[in-house]
Image: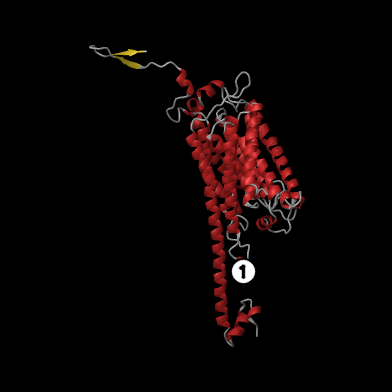
Amino acid sequence: MATWATLDCSSAQLAQLLGPNNTAAADFICSQFAAVSSKLSDTAHAVDTTYLLFSAYLVFSMQLGFAMLCAGSVRAKNTMNIMLTNVLDAATGGIFYYLFGFAFAFGGPSNGFIGRHFFGLKDIPSDSFDYSNFLYQWAFAIAAAGITSGSIAERTQFVAYLIYSSFLTGFVYPVVSHWFWSTDGWASAANTQNLLFGSGVIDFAGSGVVHMVGGIAGLWGAFIEGPRIGRFDHSGRSVALRGHSASLVVLGTFLLWFGWYGFNPGSFNKILSPYGTGSMSYYGQWSAVGRTAVTTTLAGCTAALTTLFGKRILSGHWNVTDVCNGLLGGFAAITAGCSVVEPWAAIVCGFVAAIVLISCNKLAEKVKYDDPLEAAQLHGGCGAWGIIFTALFATKKYVNEVYGGKSDRPYGLFMGGGGKMLGAHLIQIVVIIGWVSATMGPLFFVLHKLKLLRISAEDEMAGMDLTRHGGFAYVYHDDEDSEKPTTIQLRKVEPNASSTPTSV
């Protein structure tokens, strides 16, 4: 007779325990176990899908954060324009990512360069992807487009926004995400059969894939357009063209902070995966999700405080806009390594990210580069630092837990893991700069030559809300209005005489 240790819940074995003529009972019991197992599997899929959808909603809410941040960072006369571009980044990106982008990014099996299945979501759902995966990845794609729109704000023609947003979300960004996130990508850490330097690139939530792509695209757009009128005086000195609402900047920053908890922890795609067994059954991917949220928080907080005191030393002011940008710079930097570093390392990441952002802004002023939202400096510069940071501080334990399928992967240089990961990550920085420059640079240049990129000087001075969108977002007074002579009605009062109005 079979023992309990050798049973696999087959009817034949279970019948031996139940005695003779009990095959029917054994069949029934095993069928119930199979049904329970199936229900548990279904529940696991439902929990993971719900988690991914909730994360997608959080990432999508970042579009509202981008909109508020952009609106507050531009002058009031361009508010409706920048708000409309944020709406259309999402709308245009939705159509083009549905038609082409998701297929180019994740349409496997494919080659290492570009995907070739799932156009228009054909054959979705599959054993690899469901509709929730598309929604989540679309939210990432439009985030990259939103970054670029900030760099070229206040001087770009509306048609240029539509063209670049379609191209970026439908082709440029998906190709990069295929390289580093698809199981077929030539540098992906998920491509366990062909890992770059035996490591692959660990860009968990996209310091390079999202932030560098958007930042480098914005860099080329702003460089080809040139600075806004009045940004630099005749002697070349920088002139601050301050945004009209610090309140909107702060609101947008908090919304982005909130959305980042879907951006980084949500990049696990699922949550119901155990790491430990026995007495360690409390430890699983849900723990890694929590740790990722903590590292994200610490990096942003550290960058905000470092920027606060750094700018105080440099300028003598406690500037809320600078602090908000510093906070976002910390988030952009930790995005690559948030899942594979210790919380204390996230503090290092945020501290250096703030210094990188301040340095990039100083360099931008020296070369007369104008980016109204510091998007290229913040997302491009801090994103590049985040890629390097991950290759220095990724821990062995977390790398092997988060990136299974191959044991003894290389890990952070400073953690004793050698330099293979650093080599792979340096290649990532180079190829992203090269790819985005080779695609978005010529696009912006052609738009410039066709006079489809920059608005006229007259429209720029008047503001695009009035000249392109039919009116202002709200009643406001620009600084220049205060310099115009104003007729004020006063009342001249004399003793024992009637009061008469006098104009001055």
- Looking at the image, residue 6 lies above or below residue 281: below
Q: Secondary structure at mark 1?
A: helix
Residue 35 quadrant: bottom right
User: Residue lying furthest bottom in this view?
Assistant: 20
Question: Which residue lies at the image location 41% right of the left edge and 17% below the top edge?
Answer: 486
Tell me, yes or no, if residue 338 can be seen here. no
User: Residue lying furthest left in this view?
Assistant: 496
How many labels were placed on the picture?
A: 1
Question: Which residue lies at the image location 43% right of the left edge and 15% below the top edge?
Answer: 485
The quarter of the picture where the N terminus appears is bottom right
The quarter of the picture where the C terminus appears is top left
Residue 242: x and y, percent?
53, 28
Q: Which colour assignment does the render follow?
A: secondary structure
Tell me, yes or no, if residue 255 can be seen here. yes
Residue 54: x and y, percent?
52, 52
In the picture, measured across the screen, residue 168 lies left or right of residue 247, that is right
Is the residue marked by circle 1 packed among few (<14), some (14-19), or many (20+) residues within 10 Å?
few
Residue 170: x and y, percent?
62, 41
Residue 33: x and y, percent?
56, 73
In the picture, measured across the screen, residue 240 lies left or right of residue 203, that is left
Tag 1: amino acid: Gly
- Looking at the image, residue 22 lies above or below residue 408: below
Front-lying residue, 127 or 360: 360
Residue at the spot of label 1? 278
- Looking at the image, residue 282 lies above or below residue 424: below
